[in-house]
Image: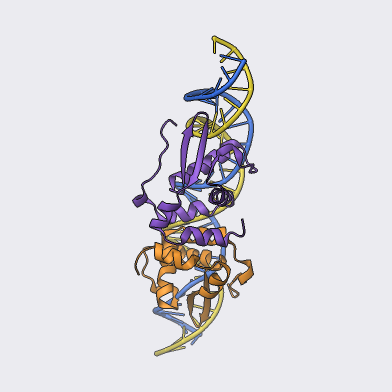
Chain colours: A orange, B purple, C blue, D yellow
DNA sequence: TCTATTGTTTGATGACAATCGAACAATAGG
DNA sequence: CCTATTGTTCGATTGTCATCAAACAATAGA
């Protein structure tokens, strides 16, 4: 748990990204990160236990959608907008737009 | 099997669409339909049994990605481009682009 | 050092999904 | 009517996923 695994930009896999986005809870996390820039895991107020949320953050991280920065006792998450846009131009924007108004 | 179920344009669900696209076999089917317009199920030459392919076509159909027209003994599939673009502007294009050159 | 906070990991459970072979249904063509 | 073709459905198997409670790890602060 010391080292969080983040795939490189070139390793981003489209099916894995689409799969990560296909869960409503994970999509909501991405939506909020798209607006807020950076947030700690515990600040989402989503209807799930911390174990479940930790699982979802892990899926998003390993698919390359988010980046997690450790600072003290917190984990700050942010969207990897630039990497996603470089690899899959227009995809994130289209998904966010399709997911409704923020 | 007489009546194939196609969800209406307004019923298209983003997570379901993303999930359907997150399988490599299904993504490949969509890619080919994007180029070819209309094709019968048996003409894809994908490495899976007909039972498995029938399953994938069903997932795509019920997510609203494809339309199946029955003619004689064949089922002709086509992409629901217009419905997808109306509901999720730019999404299909971005996914196709991200999935590589056709 | 003790305690509270934050998040991960583990283990278990129930649900769902991908895959296949075999049986079935529908149709076209003899 | 018989047969080949095309695709769906069924049943079974195997594997994966979402979820939770509980245990654990790491850190900050008193």
Residue drawn where x is 41% and y is 69% of the image: A31
Image position of B74 (left or right of A50): right
Residue drawn where x is 40% and y is 77% of the image: A36
Image position of B6 (left or right of A1): left
Q: Which of A89 and D16 is in front in this view?
A: A89
Q: Nearer the viewer, residue B56 or A72?
A: B56
Q: Which of A80 and B31 is in front in this view?
A: B31
The image shows residue A13, relative to residue B82, as above or below, that is below
The image shows residue D11, relative to residue A1, as above or below, that is above
Quarter containing the C terminus of chain A: bottom left
- The location of residue D21, given as percent across then percent down, is 42, 60
- The location of residue B74, given as percent across then percent down, is 53, 32
Quarter containing the N terminus of chain A: bottom right
Q: How many labels does the image show?
A: 0
The image shows residue A46, relative to residue B38, as above or below, that is below
- The location of residue C15, given as percent across then percent down, is 44, 46
Residue drawn where x is 56% and y is 62% of the image: B98
Image position of A24 (left or right of B31): left
């Amino acid at each position: 748990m010391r080292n969080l695994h983040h795939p490189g930009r070139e390793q981003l896999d489209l099916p894995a990204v689409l799969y990560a986005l296909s869960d409503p809870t994970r999509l909501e996390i991405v939506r909020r990160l798209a607006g807020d820039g950076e947030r700690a895991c515990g600040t989402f107020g989503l209807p799930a236990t911390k174990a479940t949320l930790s699982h979802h953050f892990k899926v998003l991280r390993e698919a390359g959608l988010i980046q997690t920065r450790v600072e003290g006792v917190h984990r700050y998450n942010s969207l990897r907008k630039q990497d996603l846009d470089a690899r899959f131009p227009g995809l994130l924007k289209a998904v966010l737009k399709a997911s409704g108004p923020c």
